[in-house]
Image: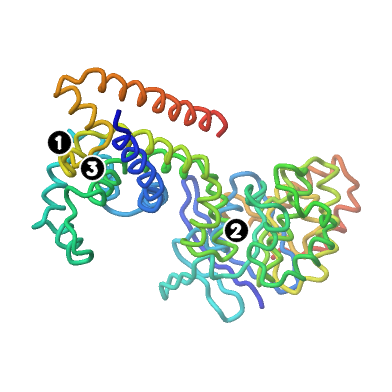
Amino acid sequence: MTLTVEVRKQLPHFCLDVNFQCQPGNLTAIVGPSGAGKTTLIRIIAGLEKPDSGRVCLGDKCWADTDSGMFIHARKRKLGLVFQDYSLFPHLNVRKNIAFAATDSDRVDELMDMFGIRHLQNKRPSAISGGERQRAAFCQALARNPVLLLLDEPFSALDAGTRRGLRHELHDLKKDLDIPVLHVTHDLEEARFLGDSILAVDNGKISPDWFGGQMRSADAMDNVTVQASLLSNKSYA
Amino acid sequence: MNWEPFYLSIKLAFWTMLLIPLVAAPIASLLAYGRFTGKSVVDALVSLPMVLPPTVLGFGLLVVMGPRGVAGMFWEDLTGDRLVFSFAGILMASLIFNLPFAVQPLRASFEKLDPRLLESAAILGLSPTQTFLRVILPNCIGGLTAASILVFAHSLGEFGVILMVGGSIPGETRVASIAIFEAVEALRYNDAFLMSAILVPVSFMVLFIINKINERR
């Protein structure tokens, strides 16, 4: 089911005003500088915050629509969300964290195998590394078979090597996902590697110019031809 | 020396400690996470027993729990017994008197909890009650333990409220603090000294344990 987002919300320094769609099976990378409103956008889609106006719909079902006054709470949206820093429950071991909201224990095993963390199942989050915790967080988010997956800078707290590894794992994983995936990042390289489409957000607005500007400034460091072809292969959502 | 007042004091402190989380935890949760009009009024009401003279609180409870009071009549209809001058009565008074001593550490503990855990719980589909039982309480077990032990220690030393609501009925409401008061009044200083000498190290140990728990949190 297609995710449709048309929201406005007044933030302290600017107005978040974003319209876009994300198709099932597609990963839309939301990229932009810190403080651009990316996380607020994700929180509105998740139902953790309300928009001032607009709507968030998945297929023909609206989760939030200010015109009709509809607002479905986050707990009823059945979505998966991976935060930028680990949001596993510290009092539960890895397995119990993943099984927390799962309906099927086979799915828990399957996910732990897929992310290679079955051997950590009896360990508490505090006893495993950052990369392992984030793998467990992915498993937790996917265990309830979500209808939408939201990733809020899931790799930003990891070291470069772990980040690269997880980026590839997510790249492989998304081929099997038939739901819309939104991936917030301020890392252009990550956005280009993972995104089927890229949404550049700056000061609360969709801003292809910001993305273009970043591309030009990056030209000095990277291969211009490769970057140009990468840009032409992406569509602005 | 008659050990019965000590037995009663410990019985009262034990039951207060056991039951108070059932009352204090939901109130602390409401004050920590709730956004509603009149929150500061609820906050002040819950803290009132800390600043009111125990005799004032005791008198108020005596009126409410007496044979013509709302709680007293309800209890009598339910059990056939009177509420004042009974162990159940002093237990109820003890729960109210101790409420701020349990609510405040619990509230602080709830407020210290990473709000992202609550958001994670919501995203994973948990209702507010499930979040409270499966996420908040297990992660605030230190605060809950500290609050319970503080209440236990505080209950051991209760005097004014117990005297007003329960009087001094041997085996029923005459707890150690009241027995000490009566011993002094009757000039039995040796008895008073002995009973006090037992209460001091017990209270000290309880506070020592609380400090150790707080250091580990």
A99 vs B54, nearest the viewer: B54
* Disc 1 element: helix
**Residue for point 73% across, 69% down:** A105
Q: Foreground residue, A107 or B122?
A: A107
Name the amino acid type tagged 3: Thr
Q: Position of residue A94 (x, y in %)?
A: 72, 54
Is disc 3 in the same subunit as disc 1?
yes
Instruction: Residue at 20% x, 25% y: name it.
Output: B183
Disc 2 marks which residue? A42
Q: Establish if A104 lies above or below B83.
A: below
**Placement of the N terminus of chain B among the 4 image quadrants:** top left
Please tell me how crowded label 2 is: few (under 14), some (14-19), or many (20+) other residues with Cα within 10 Å.
many
Nearer the observer, disc 3 or disc 1?
3
Q: Chain of mark 2?
A: A
Q: Chain of mark 3?
A: B
Q: Which residue is mark 3?
A: B173
Tag 1, which chain? B
B33 relative position to B171: left or right = right
Q: Residues within 10 Å of mark 3 (few under 14, many from 20)?
A: many
Q: Which x, y percent locates residue A182?
A: 68, 62
Looking at the image, the residue that sits furthest to the bottom is A60
The amino acid type found where label 2 is placed reads Ile
Task: Indicate whether B194 appears above or below A25.
Answer: above
- For label 1, the residue is B55
Residue B146 position in % (x across, y down): 46, 37
Can residue A123 be spotted in the picture? yes
Q: Element at badge 2?
A: helix
In the image, farthest residue toward the front: B1
